[in-house]
Amino acid sequence: MGSPQSSTRPHAVLIPQPAQGHVTPMMHLSKLLHSQGFYITFVNSDYNHRRFLNSRGPNSLEGLPDFRFVSIPDGLPASGDGDVTQDIAELCVSTAKNSVGPFRELLLRLNSGGPRVTCVVADGVMSFAQGVAQELGILGLVFWTTSACGFMGYLQYFELIKRGYVPMKDESYLSNGYLETPIDWIPGMKNVRLKDIPSFIRTTDINDTMLNFDGGEAQNALKASGLILNTFDELEHEVIEELKKICPHLYTIGPLPAFVNNIQENQSKSINSSLWKEDTQCLDWLNNQEPDSVVYVNFGSITVMTMQQLEEFGWGLANSQNLFLWVIRPDIVGGSIGLSAEFRKETESRGIIVNWCPQEKVLSHPSIGLFLTHNGWNSTLESICGGVSMLCWPFFAEQPTNCRYVCTKWDIGMELDSNVRRAEVEGLVREMMQGEKGKEMRSMARAWKEKAEEAVGREGSSYENFGRLVNDLQIGRVLLGKSL
């Protein structure tokens, strides 16, 4: 297929990994492209398609005439619950094996009627879609929904194996201080330790599924016609400069939440990407609170914990005497998620608990003074966009990498020990909310908010990079030496 003519409306097919943390930024990118005249086809998994319908209502995926939703199977058996994030390792393996054919058939069907597909934007861990696009002569780019430092960490997986750091010799290496080993040779990443590398390296098995899968997918991204990252140049300048050396067609276009907010009136702007039904009444509660008075707690869409850990977080919050808004997913703890009646009585006048909420709106609310977070990249960026400092409890993947940068590079957060204890939670919440260190970090967080807004504003680095991306996608420019 030849390059699309500039007079032909471009048609972008976007396919995220079927997990909330990937769907959200891919939806943001879709809205931005739609605002620039692109015809959009957004590809969900059949499983997530049903979740959208359950959470948003039967008409939620009707979309617009030029912003359509379609779905393909992920190959996994249907979950009995039907409203939880599927096992990530199983999902990665299954989509790579079982979604190839359905995705190829989808592209062929789209090209048989309606606007021809001019480009595919595949999630970084869905590189099979990148391969199908290349097979069919369609421009294919990848969107790694991680931070730049997280992506750079994944790129080092095979080098870490080669150098003998990974796999661990035995289970004791996970707790005997070995993870504190300095790693001083990663381009653009100074003062990191082994524990700051995306967590799938914490294995004793050389054949570990996620170690090999994510390491391979990161390398696959360098073969694409372009790489998109949801970050901005000033935030991760050193890493981005190093990535440009190995990926000349790199587009840093974040933070996407702030970018989407800048879109002029566009019909796609109101499309919601949440897989869970959001409790919006919490916004009314926030409206009645003083500025910087509320601790917002949300550990994302995947983090799980023990009932004891949940109780330690709860009593730490209670003992800090601060107001709080706490998101507790129904599946965050195996079995019952009920906090004790004593805890609920103690906090009934100063805390509310919901299953899910519109996080971007919460973090931009003036009453929020602190975010207790798992440091997923979406949450981290949304906190930066809201000018909110963070108390960090990373769970897995590149969350420890993000945490390291939040706490030591950007100076907008503090880290909780993984072995959570209520006294530490209480002390750090108090320090972040009332202490001098907390005041300094809130000030720094607001400074980063301004820099983020500058990046997506006219003449900002992300604004210019997005314009370059749009231009390249519109004219099918030869990227990375590959002619269509």
Image (cartoon, grey):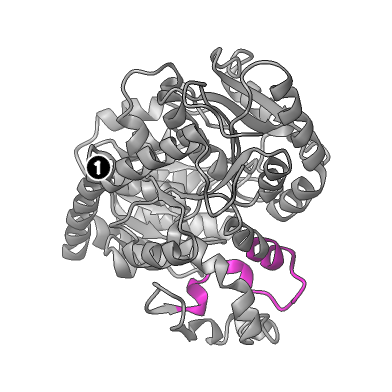
> What residue is at 45 percent from the left and 70 percent from the top?
417
Q: Is 210 in the magenta? A: yes
Stretch of the chain drawn in magenta: 193-215
Location of the C terminus (image quadrant): top right
Horizontal side, residue 273 vs residue 370: left or right: right
> What residue is at 47 percent from the left and 26 percent from the top?
6
Horizontal side, residue 189 vs residue 167: left or right: left
Q: Is residue 329 above or below residue 229?
A: above
> What residue is at 69 percent from the left and 43 percent from the top?
129
Tell me where residue 68 appears, x and y as whole percent: 60, 20
Front residue of 34/119: it is 119
Tell me where residue 154 appears, x and y as whole percent: 56, 66
Badge 1 amino acid: Glu
Q: Is residue 82 above or below residue 313?
A: above
The crowding category of the residue bearing disc 1, from other C-alpha atoms within 10 Å (few below 14, some 14 to 19, many at least 20), is some
Front residue of 43/13: it is 13
Number of marks in the rendered image: 1
Tell me where residue 187 sits by quadrant: bottom left
Disc 1, SS: helix
> What residue is at 49 percent from the left and 28 percent from the top?
278
Report the residue marked by disc 1: 453
Q: Is 161 in the magenta? A: no
Tell me where residue 461 appears, x and y as whole percent: 28, 48
Tell me where residue 95 appears, x and y as whole percent: 75, 45
Front residue of 217/245: it is 245
Front residue of 117/410: it is 117
Tell me where residue 403 sits by quadrant: bottom left
Horizontal side, residue 98 vs residue 328: left or right: right
Location of the N terminus (image quadrant): top right
Tell me where residue 19 sits by quadrant: top right
User: Is residue 338 at all visible to an observer of this figure?
Assistant: no
User: Is residue 103 at all visible to an observer of this figure?
Assistant: yes
